[in-house]
């Protein structure tokens, strides 16, 4: 099966219609007519991921995030950059195709990244499913991002997250003995507000959340709000696990979905891993 055929089949299966000129979900590099040998999925096509794909004999990489260090994978600005040149050569020398699968994953009725998060956390039955007013303007309130979990202390929830999502280190705001029951999950860049940074505080207030688990943060918005809330005596907390750890689960569990779609193809997951060392 050719790379373009794999892409078309996946997009059809999502049932989502996006403007092909506007979505970031494009073949980022490689010949669309390449015959696919094996498929790998990962959060991001880092050099480590590319090298492991080559070792596995895979030539089609499905990545959730950019390959060229910016949101839309623009590469003109990199034309003379030695890192870009060497990475591009590695990809081309091994005849790889890299396709980005981001917008479609988030646009399906049950966000595919959250599906993976729910599986790793064993929280599928805790996610709230509510009828949302179509006139609601806050995208965080329109999505299904809230969980009602069995009551647990903040320090216990942190331990579960580190174990379930294989997180080396988390940042925490709130009292270790604080109670977590109503939890909001903002994977990736969701806690930046999706267009309006005020959306995050409105989300926490209107959903009456005790805790927010998130990927990225802006230190003067939700994290500052939660810190002030704690200082004023409210039971509020935040667990920051980073963009990669919050979304990698979706790419890991994508393998099962793809294997059903392409039963004759070999599909594997390569963990991009956290980008940091902790000293």
Image: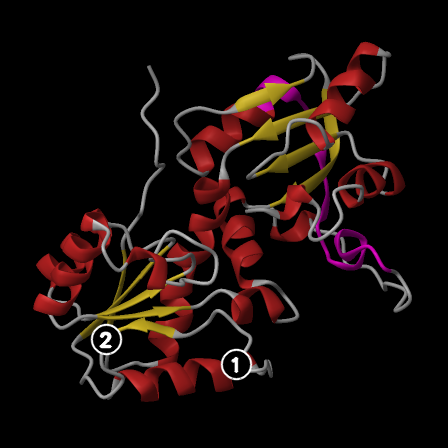
Residue for badge 1: 21
Bin the neighbour count of mark 2 within 10 Å (Cα to Cα): few under 14, some 14-19, many 20 and up. some
Q: Secondary structure at mark 1?
A: loop
Q: Secondary structure at mark 2?
A: loop
Residue for badge 2: 30
State left or right for residue 140 relative to residue 85. Answer: right
Which of the 4 quarters of the picture holds residue 9?
A: bottom left
**Residue contact at pointers 2 and 1, CB within 8 angstroms:** no
Res. 151 in view: no
Which portion, as a residue range, is magenta? Answer: 137-156
State left or right for residue 131 relative to residue 77. Answer: right
Q: Nearer the viewer, residue 183 or 65?
A: 65
State left or right for residue 164 relative to residue 229. Answer: left
Q: Is residue 270 above or below residue 23?
A: above
The residue drawn where x is 79% and y is 45% is 199
Which of the 4 quarters of the picture holds residue 36?
A: bottom left
Q: Nearer the viewer, residue 142 or 88?
A: 88
The residue drawn where x is 38% and y is 55% is 252
Please give the label number shown on residue 228.
Answer: none
The residue drawn where x is 26% and y is 60% is 79
State the CA–CA distance, disc 2 to disc 1. 18 Å
Q: Nearer the viewer, residue 135 or 22?
A: 22
Q: Is residue 104 above or below residue 64?
A: below
Q: How many callouts does the rendering have?
A: 2
Residue 254, image x and y in percent? 41, 64
Q: Which image quarter is the C terminus in?
A: top left
Bin the neighbour count of mark 1 within 10 Å (Cα to Cα): few under 14, some 14-19, many 20 and up. few
Q: Earlier in the sequence, mark 2 or mark 1?
A: 1
Res. 211 in view: yes
Residue 51, image x and y in percent? 14, 53
Q: Which image quarter is the N terminus in?
A: bottom left
């Amino acid at each position: 099966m050719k790379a373009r055929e794999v892409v078309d089949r996946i997009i059809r299966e999502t049932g989502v219609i996006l403007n092909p000129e506007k979505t970031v979900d494009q073949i980022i590099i490689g010949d669309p007519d390449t015959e696919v040998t094996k498929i790998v999925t990962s959060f991001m096509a880092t050099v480590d991921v590319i090298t492991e794909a080559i070792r596995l004999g895979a030539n089609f990489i499905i990545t959730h995030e950019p390959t060229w260090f910016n949101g839309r994978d623009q590469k003109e600005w990199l034309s003379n950059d030695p890192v870009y040149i060497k990475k591009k050569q590695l990809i081309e020398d091994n005849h790889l195709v890299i396709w980005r699968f981001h917008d479609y994953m988030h646009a399906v009725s049950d966000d595919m990244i959250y599906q993976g998060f729910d599986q790793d956390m064993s929280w599928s039955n805790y996610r709230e499913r509510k009828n949302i007013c179509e006139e609601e303007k806050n995208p965080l309130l329109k999505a299904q991002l809230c969980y009602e979990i069995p009551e647990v202390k903040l320090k216990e929830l942190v331990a579960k997250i580190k174990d379930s999502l294989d997180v080396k280190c988390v940042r925490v705001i709130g009292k270790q003995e604080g109670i977590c029951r109503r939890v909001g999950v903002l994977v990736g860049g969701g806690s930046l507000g999706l267009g309006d940074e005020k959306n995050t505080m409105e989300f926490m207030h209107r959903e009456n959340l005790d805790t927010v688990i998130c990927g990225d943060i802006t230190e003067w918005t939700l994290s500052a709000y939660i810190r002030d809330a704690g200082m004023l005596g409210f039971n509020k907390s935040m667990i920051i696990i980073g963009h990669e750890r919050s979304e990698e689960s979706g790419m890991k569990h994508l393998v099962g979905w793809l294997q059903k779609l392409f039963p004759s193809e070999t599909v594997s997951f390569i963990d991009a891993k956290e980008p940091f060392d902790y000293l």
